[in-house]
């Protein structure tokens, strides 16, 4: 539980670090942020590094801090869950974090090819603080939609609107 809290704090601290390094204090380069966040998670789960590959597939998207913080916490929770539960024993696999812009919305997907969440578990009504946090952040903080695909492991997809992507900001200038 302490380790999970440390990861959440690191996720928020990393956002502030990227924000201060940014040319515009209102937005951060989200793909750079995700790379740093995921690298930190993989490092903290050192014993899993040899067994689980974690990769990111992100577009060049800038997010405001009010969107970046909940997205970072969601990624933190879902990647941590995958590293903790998707690959028991010596099972090898892959975790992928994808962020892309689709028809005016942002689509955030965290997926793994592990054992999957059992079919009898409703992620919206679980006792897990992490999944409850993910659902709350996705639906209430981001005003988005969250879906779970159990076809090949576990894939959570969150879609939401962001007021400004990097390409939209260029159009305004």
Image (cartoon, rainbow, N blue to C red):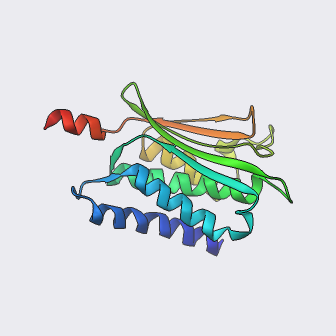
Residue 83 left/right relative to 24 = right
- Measured along the vertical axis of the image, is residue 1 above or below residue 60? below
State the residue lying farthest toward the left.
173
Residue under the image location 70 percent in, 48 percent down: 94
**Residue ID at (36%, 43%):** 61
- Tag count in the figure? 0
Q: Which residue is drawn at 75% across and 40% down?
A: 153
Q: Residue furthest right?
A: 89
Residue 164 visible in the snapshot: no
Judge by depth and name the residue closer to the eye, 142 or 88.
Answer: 88
Residue 110 lies in quadrant: top right
- Horizontal relation, residue 32 to residue 134: left or right: left
Judge left or right: residue 28 versus residue 37.
Answer: left
Q: Is residue 113 left or right of residue 41?
A: right
If the image is split into quadrants, where does the C terminus sit? top left
Q: Residue furthest top?
A: 103
Up-down relation of residue 140 to residue 133 (above or below): above
At 64% from the left and 59% from the top, the residue drawn is 80
Measuring from the top left, give residue 77's x and y in whole percent: 59, 56
Kindly indicate the quadrant of the structure image that contains residue 85: bottom right
* Residue 64 in picture, x, y percent from top left: 31, 50
Q: Can residue 121 be seen?
A: yes
Of 45 and 137, nearer the camera is 45
Give the residue at the far front of this rendering: 50
């Amino acid at each position: 539980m302490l380790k999970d809290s440390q990861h959440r704090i690191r996720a928020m601290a990393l956002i502030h670090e990227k924000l201060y390094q940014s040319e515009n204090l209102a937005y951060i380069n989200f793909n750079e942020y995700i790379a740093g966040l995921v690298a930190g998670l993989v490092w903290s789960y050192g014993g899993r590094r040899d067994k689980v590959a974690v990769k990111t597939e992100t577009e060049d998207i800038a997010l405001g801090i009010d969107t970046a913080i909940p997205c970072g916490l969601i990624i933190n929770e879902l990647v941590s869950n995958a590293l903790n539960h998707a690959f028991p024993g010596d099972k090898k696999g892959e975790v992928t974090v994808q962020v892309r812009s689709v028809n005016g919305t942002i689509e955030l997907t965290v997926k793994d090819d592990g054992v999957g969440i059992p079919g009898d578990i409703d992620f919206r009504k679980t006792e897990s603080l992490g999944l409850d946090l993910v659902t709350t952040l996705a639906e209430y903080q981001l005003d988005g939609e969250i879906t779970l695909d159990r076809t090949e492991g576990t894939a959570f997809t969150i879609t939401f609107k962001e007021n400004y992507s990097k390409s939209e900001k260029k159009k305004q200038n």
